[in-house]
Amino acid sequence: MSLKLNYVLEQVSREKNIDKDVLIEAIEKAVLAAAKKKFPDRDLEAHYNENTGEVEVFEFVEVVEKVDDSYRQISYEEAKEIDPEVQIGDELGLKIPSEELQRTTIQVAKQIIINKLRDAERDVIYNEYKDRIGELIIGYLQRIENGNLIINLGKTEGIIPRQEQSPADNFSQGERVKAVIIDVRKETKGPQIILSRTHPDLLKRLFELEVPEIYEGIVEIKSAARDPGKRAKIAVYSRNVDVDPVGACVGMRGSRVNAVTKELRGERIDIVRWDPDPVEFVKNALSPAQINKINLNEEDRIMEIIVPNENLSVAIGKRGQNVKLAAKLTGYRLDIKSEAKAEEEFESVFKPLKEKTDIDFLSMRILFDEGFRTIPAIAEADPDEIADILDIDTEKAYEIIDAAKEIYEEMQKKVEEEVDGEE
């Protein structure tokens, strides 16, 4: 070891942001391991001497009257020459001359120190990134490995796996890349920082960069959904009634939203006004589609959306894109139907029930809108619930339910006959 070790420790600690005590502990363990390889039968300890800048190795022996093991014991007479106050049974620490730790031993210690320093540096990097999940990070494309983008982040590298890359992305080596951190893993080769260009958080972070009102907390991003590289929706809300959240995100002549679209390589972005009323929120999320009616099932988080016949394709969107993104944005399962389809389903329930009871159109429409949209659903209903919904007596409710049961049995019998006929 060198007298310059103090300087080296200070420099490494400062440059690598590693605690000096961690380095000293690593060096002590490394030198001790090397010394034990050379002197395997001895009781050894290693301690760093800051005054000399040296790691000193001590051999501990027991003071005895008669020596049976020269590696573990020392005679009382010999021990007194070293320490006049020593007593039999005491342990005496004898410093091993540094020249006895041969060149090969020092090399082993040096390599272990390098490994320990590398491990400590990896821990520093892991600790620096592990609490930054969801954060925007900027790096440069260093290389491509097996379809994965390796991003230079300065002190370390990040990786954008193939599945986290947008179809619209096409980066060149050395080009600046913006992504969000989605995971930080401890690996044998060091921490692996997983980045994403497809995650909805990237959309949020980019708007935070472009819209001061979001950064200041006036406008809040409530949710975001993406079909990466194609289309996205973002729901925003303003805490200040005088600030239009949609306008703030769009910017003057679309400057803010266009900047985000450019970063996402042309991804079309719908900015939606968030509403605490889930029905209103879904209407906003499905824009520009016109909506005639929404039937809400809050318990199962399902909404049946009735739209004009000519508006069905707009509501669903190309390859179902509009409704899928709206569902992700709002957290509801959305079942979109045209007026014609909804009326067809209504007639399929009302017509057979009307033939067996005197239920009128309005009562059936009320039942239908309350979620009783099939014959089995009415057959299994609670009479008291039906009576309460239609404001009728329980006896009348039983008549409707019994009629539904009869119709259901006829339906099942018909299906069985068709199956038997095919056989």
Image: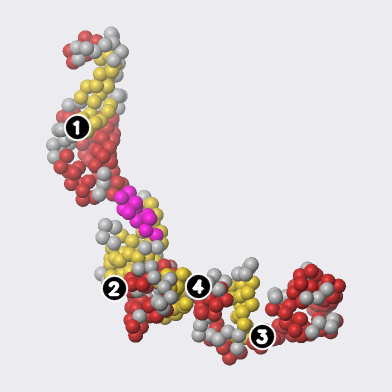
Type of the residue with mark 1: Asn
Nearer the observer, disc 3 or disc 1? 3
Residue 202, by quadrant, is bottom left
Type of the residue with mark 4: Leu
Nearer the observer, disc 3 or disc 2? 3
Cα–Cα span, label 1 and label 2:
52 Å
Residue 338, by quadrant, is bottom right
Q: From this viewpoint, is residue 26 visible?
A: yes
Labels 1 and 2: the sequence-earlier one? 1
Type of the residue with mark 2: Ser
Kindly identify the residue that appears in the image at 66 percent across and 88 percent down. Answer: 340
- Circle 4/circle 2 CB separation < 8 Å: no
Cα–Cα span, label 3 and label 2:
50 Å
* Residue to which mark 2 is pinned: 172
Nearer the observer, disc 1 or disc 2? 1
* Residue to which mark 1 is pinned: 49
Q: Position of residue 413 (x, y in %)?
A: 83, 75
Element under disc 4: helix
Nearer the observer, disc 4 or disc 3? 4
**Residue 56 vs residue 421: left or right?**
left
Kindly identify the residue that appears in the image at 86 percent across and 72 percent down. Answer: 395
**Residue 70 vs residue 381: left or right?**
left
Type of the residue with mark 3: Lys
Circle 1 packing at 10 Å, graded few (<14), some (14-19), many (20+), is few
Q: Is residue 267 magenta?
A: no
The circle drawn on residue 341 is 3
Residue segment shown in magenta: 122-133
